[in-house]
Amino acid sequence: MTVEVKQEVTVTLRFFASVREQLGQSEQTLTLPPGLTTVGQVRDWLIARGAPWAAALASERPLRMAYQQVLCEQSQPLVLSDPTQEIAFFPPVTGG
Amino acid sequence: MKILVQTEDFDLSAEVAALHAAQVGAIVSFVGTVRSDAAVTEMELEHYPGMTEKSLIQIAQQASSRWQLNDVVIIHRVGLLPGGAQIVLVAVASQHRGNAFAGCEFIMDYLKSEAPFWKKETGPDGPRWVDARSTDITALDKWQ
């Protein structure tokens, strides 16, 4: 018999540009419910919280994501034991 | 290598002068500016402190090894910029011009599609976020 220990994960979420404005905040540190293992699942969980998350992070919106300050895909895994994880959501970049 | 994200303006000739060195036979530079027309009176640039610098260093390193660049300067301004202001400087030094032209363009193409900066323009109808252009993404195809 295997015993699955579901660990709680603490992450710092960061938001930029239009996403930051829609959410009315630039940063939030929170503890995720057990079972979330990827950046995409964190996004889905936030969307499920309703307004203003659902609109700001809507899956049909071409948002970009970063994990530990590096661009990533939805499939990016979280490291369950790392309490310093940073996930960012933002619109496509427009610098230069 | 010199990577700076700053609110202050920069001096193109001073940056280019600093790239002159014994092995350098070619210096190519690019300056991006805020367009000054009726539609845009000023522009605000937001960025992701920490990730921005990491991303620019990574792009500069990639360009340096691919195009054998002797040196790279990237300066990107943030904050409120009036019409006509300089936004970004990329200058690269190499032995020959081919690598310098390609290296400079490579850096700008990647910077525009990967470095976490966002522009907000203010015009007659108020401020609005600038949309990303699909041509900036397809510009990367030529480097594959």
Image: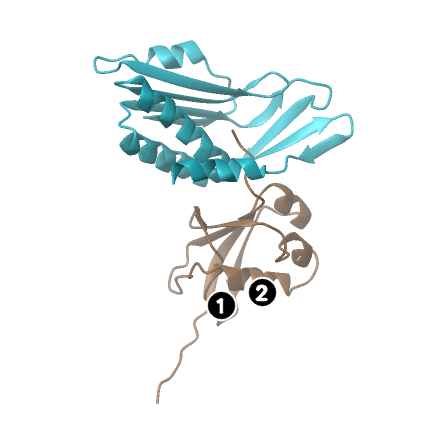
Residue type at mark 2 is Trp
Q: Which mark is residue A36?
A: 1
Residue B56 sits in quarter: top left
Q: Residue at x 39, y 62 (%)?
A: A79
What's the image's color scheme? by chain
Q: Residue at x 62, y 54 (%)?
A: A57
Marks 2 and 1 sit apart, C-alpha to C-alpha, by 8 Å
- Asked if disc 2 and disc 1 are in contact, CB closer than 8 Å, the reply is yes
Q: Which mark is residue B58?
A: none
In this structure image, what is the colour of chain B? cyan
Q: How far across and down, in percent of the image, does residue A76 sit?
A: 43, 58
Asked if residue B51 is positioned above or below residue B21 in the image, the reply reads: below
Residue type at mark 1 is Leu
Q: Which residue is mark 2?
A: A45
Asked if residue A77 is positioned above or below residue B115 in the image, the reply reads: below
Secondary structure at badge 2 equals helix
